[in-house]
Amino acid sequence: MPPMIMNGLFTQLLGAIVAVSLAPLFLGWVNQCRAWLSNRSAPPLLQPYLVIRKLLHKDAVLAENASPLFRVVPYILFGAMVTAAAIIPSLGTALPFAVCADAIALVGLFATARVFIALAAMDIGTAFGSMGARREMMVGFLAEPALLMVVFTASLICGSTALPTIADTLAGRTLAIYPSLAFAGVAFLMVLLAENARIPIDNPATHLELTMIHEAMVLEYSARHLALIEWASALKLFNYACIGFALFLPWGLAHEDNPLALLWALPLLGLKLIAAGAGLALIETVSAKLRIFRAPEFLAMAFMLAVLGLLVRLLLGS
Amino acid sequence: MSPQTQQEPAPIQGDFPARRLTVAADQWVHTAESLRPAGARLLALWASDERDHGADFTVHAAILKPSRLLVLELRVPEQQPVFPSLMPVFPAAARMERAVFDLLGLRAQGGDARPWLRHAAWPQDQFPLRRDFAAHRVFPNAQEAYPFVRVEGDGVHEIAVGPVHAGIIEPGHFRFSVVGEKLLRLEERLGYVHKGIEKRFEQLSLDAGQRLAARVSGDSAVAFSWAYCMALEGICGLAPPPRALYLRALLLERERLANHLGDLGALGNDAGFGFGLAQFSRLKENLLRLNEAAFGARYPMDFVVPGGVAADLAKDSKPPLLRQCAALEREVAGLRRIYDEHSGVQDRFAGCGRVAPELARSLGLMGLAGRASGQARDLRNDVAAPPYDRLSVKTAGRSEGDVAARVAVRFDEALESLRLCRKILDELPPGAVRAALPEQPPEGFGVGLVEGWRGPLLVALEAGPRGTIRRCHPHDCSWQNWPVLEHAVIGNIVPDFPLINKSFNLSYSGQDL
């Protein structure tokens, strides 16, 4: 086997493993920062791992009328997020797997996961599950086009929809502020908040059933199923952060011809995550949750910014 | 005119002007109606079994004129246990009358016939508060269907919430009829924490009753025990020493503060603003810790006792109490600025769960929630039982009636309570803190009336022979305010309900008894 492919496979595998293993840590870091910012003593940094371990040790309780779909959805969800992690250039851009799925496929992958979790939420037939599914779809149908527009803006600049190519091209440009990317960046941040059930759209820490979006959908899950869902949620947040880095902070990724660069790509990724986590916590601490009918306005704003980015690129070429 | 001769109202001894008046059945509704234009409100409605005194049953209605209390009494014969419903005059009477049937078997004519406090824990034909019902009886578990009011229409569906909730809160069932996210109707079903408190009172001595009264609703422990003691002291014709009254007021204001601080934090949290919860929880915790240092308990349940207070202020605790008042004033004002200037929080609060002043007046909304809807009534001012007659409380008031108004009233009252605490500590009279009750308290009827943090609460106490409790009815204004919550949510969206509910923060235990 040529060393090029070997390098690629290694980067690919390392990226997926790093994502799966570090995702809960990133979530723990965000929670840590949120606690600090509101003068609370923080839970342990490793709390998400402890939660997953606790859940894996429990016996699963299933509703009597749960269909097989309800049982498989946690695995589908987790699988979708791991696959996404393999497409996103988090450490290096030499990803042989990425040729079979570009950024549009990535958005589709997230949409597939959403459809399945919404179906599972409605499967038991409780009022909360259907309510959560309904709200999730409302958020989703507005967030997905915005995300696509962000990706298109970057694709127009780079002439490709493959994320590794985009990251490579953007990293090679001279350091400057590109108005199109600035618009897209703000739009992306808004989509990230909405898609990951963060304040101001959803509140991941709430116990009020009637206000929940994501939590309402997973109320009926327990034990290993819930562990997988929690893990998949952490992975989703990690993936979104890495998409953000690939589009807007693409420096420091290892290239195909230089596998040793992985050695410093990893600590650099850690630094980026630390900064991103702190920034996310800051946004969440200073905002209140939006009234749910403000969510469409919020996401329409994201879409509009992304379209502006696209127009700026098309018309002004900057 | 009634065939019976109209009796003169008899005064009830105590700290404030109160009278009782026995009326005939055909005058029952009419008398209530004649009081209504003067701004009278129904404070409580309960019944008692007087068959051992040869007087069948009695229904009592405590009606609060702005500064006086009138207890109307109606004899109801055992052979025909029905009485006219007060619901047309005071809508708040509906649930109290249903509870009267569940507990004593007296049916209000023209009212709702569904059970209210009875959840099939005892059979329909058994009435626990009758004197021939043995308190220790146990009935097998049963299931009974409860007919909720259904809303029909295109796309209308029901969301059933509770009685077990995702958070650690008291149990209550809420049945929402919704279209999409819009609330068409809310129906509450309470009574899940019915503990038989009123029956238990009848097994206790007058002295021990205070301990039970303090535990009717944990967040109003001081208010309930004070109201109980006020009723008992009225019966005994005993005035507690001034220092004791001042210390009671100090505790009551600190109880109000603790609850307001907790609520303000929780309201921020329910709007997704966790920062508020963290800050207000810290302030509340400081308050509770100083309670422990100064009064011996974080939540001093048994500090107010018949005749005065259980102990004097702990030595050297006056300066820290004063210092805490100053610190809280500063911090609460700072946090108020943050809440007021936070557009996200204000967007959630403003216009949410609105109760217009006219609606509040007709439904008899009370206390803090009432003051946010233009009902500027406060017993600390209106009745001004000692020591409030010398403290001149500034009544908070808003007229918007939304969550923002209830938040603003809480801020105003918290700051006013801090001012009162300082004034009380500055003017604290010297002397004893407890007067002895007579060896053998006389038989008689007394009422205690206290403005708790949530609103007015009443304890009606009837002393039996040899220091026993013949009947005791503790009443929290949650009875009046729960039905108004059903109106407040109409037209709002489902995810705003927790915020609206928290802005009222009503007691389950206090109304389930």
Image: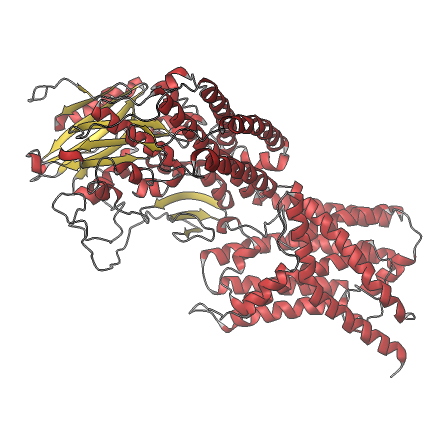
Asked if residue B378 can be seen in this view, the reply is no
**Location of residue B254 by image quarter:** top left
* Residue in front for this viewpoint, A106 or B236: B236
User: Which residue is rendered at x = 21% and y = 45% of the image?
Assistant: B102
Q: Is residue B27 left or right of residue B297?
A: left
* Residue in front for this viewpoint, B510 or A99: B510
Q: Is residue A132 left or right of residue B138?
A: right
Tell me where residue B67 appears, x and y as whole percent: 31, 18
Q: Quadrant of the C terminus of chain B?
A: top left
Q: Is residue B302 above or below residue A122?
A: above
Tell me where residue B309 appears, x and y as whole percent: 35, 30
Q: Quadrant of the N terminus of chain B?
A: top left
* Residue in front for this viewpoint, A181 or B452: B452
Q: Is residue A310 above or below residue A116?
A: above
User: Which residue is rendered at x = 36% and y = 45% of the image?
Assistant: B188
User: Which residue is rendered at x = 27% and y = 55% of the image?
Assistant: B145
**Location of residue B246 by image quarter:** top left
User: Which residue is rendered at x = 20% and y = 57% of the image?
Assistant: B139
Asked if residue B371 can be seen in this view, the reply is yes
